[in-house]
Amino acid sequence: MMGELIFRNLLHRPLRTLIGAMGIAVEVALVVLIVGLTSGLLTETARRIEGIGADIMLQPPSSSIFFAFGSAPMPIKIGDKLAELKYVQSVAPVLFQFNTTGIEIVYGIDQESFRAVSGGFVFLQGHDMEGPDDILVDDIAAKTKKIQPGQTYRIFDHDWHVAGIVDHGKGSRLFVPLATLQELVGARNKATIFFVKCTRPEHTEDVMENMRHVLPGYTVRPLKDYLSLMTSTNIPGLESFINAMILLAITIGLLVIFLTMYTTVIERTRDIGVLKSLGANHWFVVRALLSESAALCVLGIAAGVGLSYLVRAGFVWKFPTLTILITSGWILRAAGIALLGALFGASYPAWIASRKDAVEALSYD
């Protein structure tokens, strides 16, 4: 009986039911997509950094793990000190420069040292950098920007010659000669980070201790732990932003459910009177309205999950370099948040309905 009552109530005002479900869907999709976008970007960036193949990275003191926040460049001569340490096989200095037009980090690299650390690029088209104005582009960026070898690509108010297209996964999507980038950004003989390759992986801890002794105060991190470090809690302000967006989503869902159920109670005043005259108690009325809210929420959750995947597909189609990581864990969390918000939003209208006098409700016009 309760199930049939809920089903008929939802179909009684199909447009209102649709609007209520879409409000919940927007709430769920907003939570899933915001978290998926941030976690996807962090995870994808971390995997590309780990893909360089180094064992250790050296940064200036108090540096963020998120390179886009910018670390003060270090003297390039630090690389010579690192190369002299025991168990160090090779050292690659890299200068980072944030490209605001493409919202990406460009790597200025020394070809020989970067090849020694990373094992070299896998070329899909073209060849390695040969001149000071050559640039390498990974396959995803090349597809997004419609770049081919031999073309001219302009960044930092400088025209670059596209020498080759390389397989993705070596840190950046754009690589230019270190010396040229140093001149362009006014960082002559400077590097943002040093990637260190050990003779054997098991020597990593020993090399890190030696690096801390030789360069006290500098930030030394093992790359094998980099993926676990790339979380929202380690990025300044990011966790607060995520929490604020989740709070906004909860507010949207709560208000939608509240307004939907409040208008439902007003419209069904006579129906509530009939139920009470037939012997329905306060708890039956409350349970009926909360169950209807839960059913509406389930519809909204299903629509929200579908909307999340649809929006992700659209973004990935439009921006192939964008990564949105949708996980079952956050789908369940978003569903739980939506359900709790729906029940909370419906609790006051349900309480009002349960308090209505049967005689007054029957005489309501």
Image (cartoon, grey):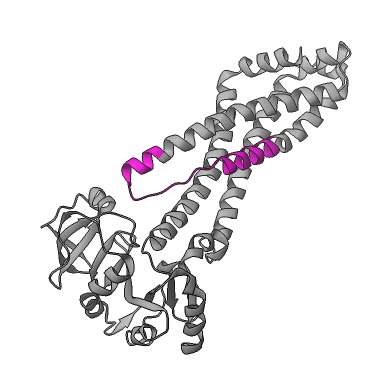
Q: Picture coordinates of residue 350 (x, y %)?
A: 78, 29
Q: Is-magenta flag for residue 317?
A: yes
Give the magenta range: 313-342
Tell me, yes or no, if residue 99 can be seen here: no
Residue at position x 49%, y 70% in the image: 202
Q: Which quadrant is home to the N terminus?
A: top right
Looking at the image, is 181 positioned above or below residue 256?
below
Apparent side of residue 316 relative to residue 26 in the rendered image (left or right): left
348 displayed left or right of 149 = right
- The prevailing secondary structure element of the residues shown in magenta is helix
Q: Residue 82 at x, y = what percent?
A: 39, 83
Residue 118: % across, % down: 32, 66
x 80%, y 30%: residue: 352
Q: Residue at x 37, y 81 (%)?
A: 73
- The quarter holding residue 28 reads top right
| Residue 300 visible to the viewer | yes
**Residue 289 shown left or right of residue 65 in the figure:** right
Between 267 and 245, the one nearer to me in the picture = 245
Q: Residue furthest left?
A: 150
Between 104 and 88, the residue placed more toward the observer is: 88
Name the residue nearer the viewer: 194 or 29: 194
Q: Please state, as top left, top right, bottom left or bottom right, where the C terminus lies in the image.
A: top right
Q: How many marks?
A: 0
The part of the image, by quadrant, that contains residue 356 is top right
The reply to whether the magenta stretch includes residue 122 is no
Residue 363 falls in which quadrant of the image? top right
User: Where does the image place residue 46, in percent across and percent down from the top left?
Assistant: 44, 60
Residue placed at 55% from the left, 34% from the top? 25
**In the foreground, 359 or 56:** 56
